[in-house]
């Protein structure tokens, strides 16, 4: 019976936030604009495209951030992987699946280089990330005549916009990353390092090798996110001046919210998916209100700030609740003693 209650709590904890956001935005959209949040197949397709992009990028951030490494070069790794990998795949007539595979490979290579430099040079992750961002952005901008990657009108790339294909890739990513984080030797060592790097190293775990693997995984996931973002927009135009960092900051909120949900789901990957889905419902809902993208961004960051404040002070609420219970028990005990 207790096991069934635990499963029920896990399910409720996982779906509560996405359902709540959907209900709120559905009600607001119907009341103000007279339209449904998800009203047709186009809405579903747009939701899945944006969802898999946010989901994969949030998982990429999670790969390092939960171990104390903030990799600001992830956005530039995405540009590097998709522009080089995508163009090479198109030149070989490999179609959309080839674009996806080559983008993963080049994204992972970009992450591998950042990881190796971090291990060898021991530069602060944020500082290294900023430096590598400038390098990767310059490489992406200076290649292919500064045109980036154009998927619109290219043959055999329509599969990247197919709802079934997107769903399959999302499931594959979710299952693969869940296995890596929860059940593999890599995941076991990663959790040990997150607990204490010194104790993990003393127990024989090669923390530097694990670190490089985390960067490789993050780069590959960023490559996946970039491919579906490009398929949605039709093109990926290279940027400079650390503009690619915006991809990192936009997807930190889904990752943080997802980790909070994952604490109830007992699975961080499922939690990140639920967090990304919740924020996509919010974004679509605000768009259907005709709200300017700048105001949408302000609302997202304000919600992130409120959530962060709450999350950092959650222990205070728990402490106050336990203190109130102890006080109530003390009053009952004093009353019982007085009656004797």
Image: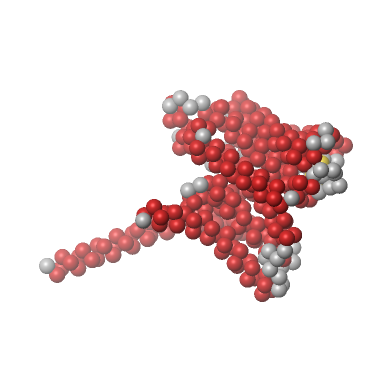
| Pick the front one: 119 or 20 | 20
Residue at 71% x, 73% y is 34
Residue at 60% x, 30% y is 212
Colouring rule applied to residues? secondary structure
* Quadrant position of the N terminus in the picture: bottom left
Image height of 259 relative to 204, above or below: below
Number of callouts in the render? Answer: 0
Image height of 283 relative to 241, above or below: below
- Is 47 positioned to the left or the right of 138 in the image? left
Residue at 58% x, 59% y is 18
Please state the horizontal and vertical placement of residue 116, each as a whole percent of the image.
63, 27
* Quadrant position of the C terminus in the picture: bottom left
Image height of 88 relative to 33, above or below: above
Outermost residue to the front: 164
Please state the horizontal and vertical placement of residue 164, each as a whole percent of the image.
69, 50
Residue 249 seen in render: no
Please state the horizontal and vertical placement of residue 293, each as a whole percent of the image.
73, 59
Residue at 54% x, 54% y is 308
| Pick the front one: 223 or 167 | 167
**Residue 151's image quarter?**
top right
**Residue 96's image quarter?**
top right
Outermost residue to the left: 340
Residue 105 seen in render: yes
| Pick the front one: 149 or 169 | 169
Please state the horizontal and vertical placement of residue 157, each as a whole percent of the image.
80, 44
């Amino acid at each position: 019976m207790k096991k069934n209650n635990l499963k029920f709590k896990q399910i409720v904890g996982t779906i509560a936030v996405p359902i709540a956001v959907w209900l709120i935005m559905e009600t607001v959209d119907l009341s103000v604009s007279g339209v449904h949040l998800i009203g047709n197949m186009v809405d579903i397709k747009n939701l899945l495209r944006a969802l898999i992009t946010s989901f994969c990028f949030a998982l990429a951030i999670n790969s390092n951030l939960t171990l104390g490494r903030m990799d600001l070069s992830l956005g530039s790794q995405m540009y590097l992987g998709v522009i080089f990998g995508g163009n090479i795949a198109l030149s070989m007539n490999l179609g959309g699946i080839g674009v996806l595979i080559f983008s993963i490979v080049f994204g992972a290579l970009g992450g591998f280089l950042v990881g190796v430099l971090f291990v060898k040079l021991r530069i602060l992750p944020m500082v290294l990330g900023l430096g590598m961002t400038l390098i990767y952005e310059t490489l992406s901008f200076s290649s292919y005549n500064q045109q980036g990657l154009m998927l619109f009108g290219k043959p055999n790339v329509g599969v990247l916009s197919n709802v079934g294909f997107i769903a399959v890739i999302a499931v594959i990513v979710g299952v693969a990353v869940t296995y890596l984080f929860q059940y593999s030797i890599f995941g076991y060592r990663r959790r040990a390092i997150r607990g204490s790097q010194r104790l993990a190293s003393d127990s024989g775990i090669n923390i530097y090798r694990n670190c490089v693997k985390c960067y490789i995984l993050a780069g590959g996931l960023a490559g996946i996110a970039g491919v579906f973002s490009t398929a949605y927009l039709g093109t990926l135009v290279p940027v400079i001046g650390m503009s690619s960092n915006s991809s990192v900051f936009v997807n930190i909120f889904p990752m943080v919210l997802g980790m909070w949900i994952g604490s109830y789901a007992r699975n961080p990957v499922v939690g990140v998916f639920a967090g990304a889905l919740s924020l996509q419902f919010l974004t679509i809902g605000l768009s259907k209100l005709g709200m300017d993208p700048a105001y949408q961004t302000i609302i997202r960051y304000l919600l992130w700030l409120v959530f962060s404040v709450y999350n950092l002070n959650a222990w205070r609420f728990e402490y106050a609740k336990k203190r109130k219970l102890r006080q109530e028990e003390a009053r009952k005990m004093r009353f019982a003693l007085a009656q004797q």
